[in-house]
Amino acid sequence: MKTALEIGHLAGSRKAFTLPLDYVTRTGAIVAMRGAGKTVTATVIAEEMCEAGLPWIAFDPVGVWWGLRVNPDGSAGGYPVLIVGGEHGDLPLEKHAAPRLAEALVRENVCCVIDLALESKNTWRGFVADFCDRLMELRPSVPRHIFLEEAPEFIPQKPMGEQKRSLAAVDRLTRLGRNNGYGTTVVSQRFATVQKDVLTQCENLFAMRTTGKPDRTAAKDWIGECVQPAPDDPTVQQFLDSLADLNDGEGWFWSPQWLKLFEQVKVRERKTYHPGRTRSVGQAAQQVELSNVRDFVERVRPLLEEERPKPAGKPAAKAAPAFKALQEQSTESTAKLRAAEAEAARLRGQNADLHRQLGAAKATVQVLRQTLEPQYRAMERLFADLDTVASTNGAGDRAVWEPWKAKLGTTCARIIDILLERGGTATVAQLATLASVAPRTLYNNLTPLARNGLITRSHGSVTLRVP
């Protein structure tokens, strides 16, 4: 049995970084710009909770958390997580069933992804508000954690319409949920767009790569509220100065009151499939197969279909005809169910045949691999030599850069040309001067180059990478 949540290791060393199991009832925030690793960090925590037997619920407006049911290579595996809504839902998301779903999940201690990606934003906010309000009326026998992706959609700095309801519900859950056995983690691309009152209730912070000045100011506000450092504390400046240059998957974990930690952490790789990982240009989408959670579905479905007691003193009119209609519907449903079971049996037989064919194909592939291994190794050495030759001139064949220059725009193209002219490396100051742009504009254009793996940044210098 797990005794801690294994999140990764300290940056620059192999010393493990873990969180206590008690994080399940604590509050946290994960903030990072797109592609820096915020969703990976949140799902790594969820994976660890699965292994520790700690139930959780994730609201996913992006539609990527279903990957927890799939192995990294796309095969069925991962963890037994129930998915409600979205393209991969085990159960449909019923807009007005949020309270019943909250009751069912609390009663059954099921880990669950509520996929909101196919719904409107008003539906997102109303569903989250109703769910969290009902959650706070329940006292679970087992503590659980609530993850809220794209938090500014629900708890924005300036709420409007349904956002006011979702803000009130999430704020109450964050402030008072621990008394009922709930913890929360809000996930956002920016500090500045999350409601300040909720953010400052988060006693733990994962701060990953962030570049904007308003976000640095908001991060400083969090420090002032939660850490209350001395005016000359060098830790604050170290934290703020490093945010723009953190690598993917790296961030600062700051827990000033609970764990009294301030550490730079490298989050481990996921043990499951990450649908949101950025693909290279021209790379085909990976085929995936979700693991079977039929037992979870069969346990939760009846709880969602339970009828609530009708108010006394108001008998339904024409009860007998209504009952007869229900009987006819039940008979029709039974016939459809039997037909579905027969079809499922046929598909299982086809699946068994396919598995046998796959086994034969794997044996054939193994023979081919053994036959072609020498040629493969020779080609591998040849391409390694070609990469070495390409890297010596700092940029390789200039023609490979043209598609990227056309795609990323004039300023990015100019930066690429300057780096090619200078042998592949230049300082930030040199780039700003030669490109005739302000430092802010330069940094804004370095971001898409770094996100697409075309440059690396280190200690004030920028190096071109062969795509």
Image (cartoon, rainbow, N blue to C red):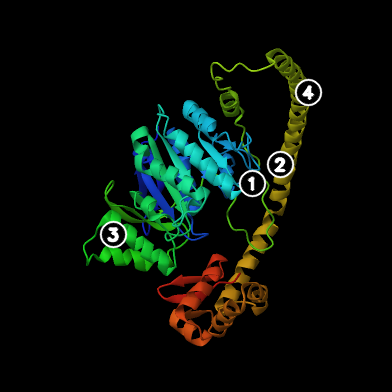
Circle 2 Cα neighbour tier, 10 Å, few/some/many (<14 / 14–19 / ≥20): few
Residue type highlighted by circle 4: Ala
Q: CA distance from mark 3 to mark 1?
A: 39 Å
Q: Residues within 10 Å of mark 4 (few under 14, many from 20)?
A: few
Please report whichever mark, 4 or 2, sits nearer to the chain's N-terminal start. Answer: 4
Closer to us: mark 2 or mark 1? 1
The answer to whether residue 55 of the structure is visible from this angle is: no
> Mark 1 or mark 4: which is in front?
1
414 or 12: nearer the viewer:
414
Q: Amino acid at mark 1?
A: Leu
Q: Nearer the viewer, mark 3 or mark 4?
A: 3
- Dot 3, how many residues are within 10 Å of its Cα: few (below 14), some (14-19), or many (20+)? some
Find disc 1 in the rendering and name its residue.
118
Say which residue label 4 marks.
Answer: 339
In this orientation, which residue lies closer to the viewer: 355 or 71?
71
Earlier sequence position, callout 1 versus callout 4 = 1
Q: Are marks 4 and 2 in contact (CB under 8 Å)?
A: no
